[in-house]
Image: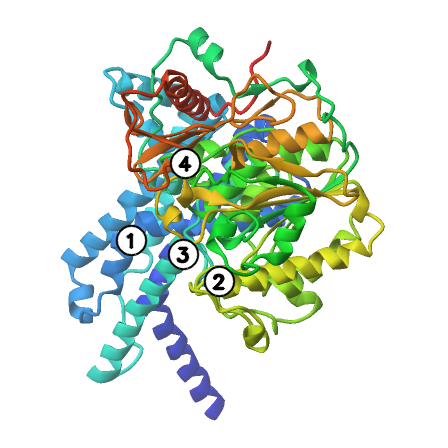
Amino acid sequence: MRNRYNSSFLGELLRRLSHTRLAIIVWRIVMLYATMQLCHAIFYLYNADLVGEITAAEIGQLWRGSLLFDNASIIYSMLLFLILSALPIPDRWWNSRVYRTTLFATYIIPAAVVVAANMGDTVYFHYTQKRCTADELFFADNDNTAELMLQFMWENMHLVLLALAIIALLAWGYRRSRHAEELFDGIILQSISRILLLLFVVFCSIVGIRGGMTRMTRPITMSNAMLYTQSPAKANMILSNPFCIIRTLSGSVTVPEFFEEEELKAIYTPSHYPAEYHSEMFGRYEGYNVVLFILESFSAEHSAYLLPEEHTGEGYTPNLDRVMSEGLCFSRCYANGATSIAAPPTIWSSTPSYETPFMLMSESLAECRPMPRILADKGYDTAFFCGSERGSMGFGAYARMTGIERLYSMEDYAARYSMADFDGKWGIWDEPFMKFMGEELTELQQPFFATIFTLTSHHPFIVPDEVRDELPAGTTLNHRPVAYSDRALGRFMEQCRQESWFENTLFVFVADHVSSERMAERTLHSPGCFHIVGCIYAGDGSLRGEYDSIMSQTDFMPTILGLVGNDEPYFAIGRDIFNEPWREPFTLIRSGYGYVGLSDDYVVDFDGCDILGVYGYDDVHRERNIATSADVENIEKMMKATLQSYYTHVEARNYAPDVE
């Protein structure tokens, strides 16, 4: 008798659980996930020849990546449905005919759009090798758009019928569970459960759109697909719509038209042909390892070596100053942007960010031959180290896109040691993580190319408590963290000196951007607000001196490739400072809503069309506009040609040198 009673009670409980609002919402959303996965499968079957064979080892990673983007796509498209479903209203309203009809409409209409968009992508990719993004919305305003769409539908009627069948199944599955019941009796418990349901839905929506729940996770972008595969084609298979459209709604690429094609190439070209000219420096370090430091917020003003007039003592970077004094120092080195996310493409790919960070542009997801990929094909083992959470800021995803094979993050450090060295904000403190990096480098096959993006010299500007009093406080919030990271760098170099590969290694140092905390008057104006540390140090001590012409982040890729003897033509916005004497020292920097052009003699303010002001390079306070008297015709042409060439290639997703 008791067993029968317990069985009856359990059955009734399960029945009521299955009819709660939460259970109904979950069921309807699960159907959407199944639909999205089916769309991925159809996409692959239709485009298998373009995507390539998928091995059993890849399936798990590709599936995980697809879920990440499906989360965002479903939440973007179903936001109104989720909100209406979770509103804390009484059941008699929720179960009313009007409300049920409204809920059904807010579900099936967006679901139909999602299915149609993904089916359309299946066909669209076969022609363009890209996902449909907001760009296509801008091109859809043509008289023949409707005609073309009908034609494509007729040519792919089997996909149209399949899409209609999927939508019909969603409608059938939706209506299987219609009436909601309360799990609890009593108004108070019912009200609490409804409010908790709403909070739960809001929380899950935020997590899904961001792509994670930690503060280190930024909203995911299309480039994050490269975290789950090294193939751009397979990355497109991971992606889904409406994510791709909504995340690219900020605007389409507009190519300025200043010059005809032949005139443009005569002024400036991003195509490099290193076999045409070899200086004595070309290939001087062939076979050397390359260790690249992207130093968080290392402004030039932190260095007493670069700006001795701003310091009364040794400054905040004595270890880096020692390296610069013993290596090749770039005394006028500039960041091409003001954010961390702009640095990796600029340094690895010589592709700066102008109006939109390149990593966030859908156009970045294309075939390319950046420095890591070129070196990998020359036999280099490639690695990227960042002490933050895997995938943080999209760095790891872009690293994979550039051809870097090994990714080392906070999770890898914790797996070996623990989370005891977590700074509580961003990741592992720089000093222990650099030590970890040094240990890992000894395991890499030589030659190797390794990059580290440091963390500690970043807001909230904290250092480990046990070393705080050992570091100079300085005059800004970031001076002590910079001094800490510099000390970590010094200890890393001492650690590496004990290794057999040290003397056969080029160590490259460049900041991602200047610090938000500034002390010198000159850093309040351009170009000082972009002036960063930069140098190359050879472990054997053979590379010394000071390069005092304009040097920017875009110049590191061409220069390093020249030093290690790369003869392959490549695409790069910057220049090889040793092997391309016909390219004058020049760089273009995005500044606010305009640009700054830098030559050895001038600082030029440019709004994208016209020159706004011209100042002498040494006019720190920008007191004398010499636009009417200076000969800036050449630099004006360079600014316009650089912009036009950049956006021409970005729009075409073409990051390859022109065929001669």
Q: What element carries label 1?
A: helix
Instruction: Report the Cα–Cα distance between label 4 and label 1.
Output: 54 Å
How many labels sit on residues? 4
> Along the polypeptide, which appears first: circle 4 or circle 2?
2
Identity of the residue drawn at 70% across and 21% down:
279
Label 3 crowd (10 A; few <14 / some 14-19 / many >=20): some
Label 4 crowd (10 A; few <14 / some 14-19 / many >=20): few
Q: Quadrant of residue 164?
A: top left
Q: Quadrant of residue 284?
A: top right
Instruction: Report the Cα–Cα distance between label 4 and label 2.
Output: 26 Å
Identity of the residue drawn at 22% across and 84% down:
188
**For the residue marked with disc 4, what is the amino acid?**
Asp
In the drawing, what numbered circle is on residue 519?
A: 3
Q: What element carries label 4?
A: loop
**For the residue marked with disc 3, what is the amino acid?**
Met
Residue at the disc numbered 1: 79
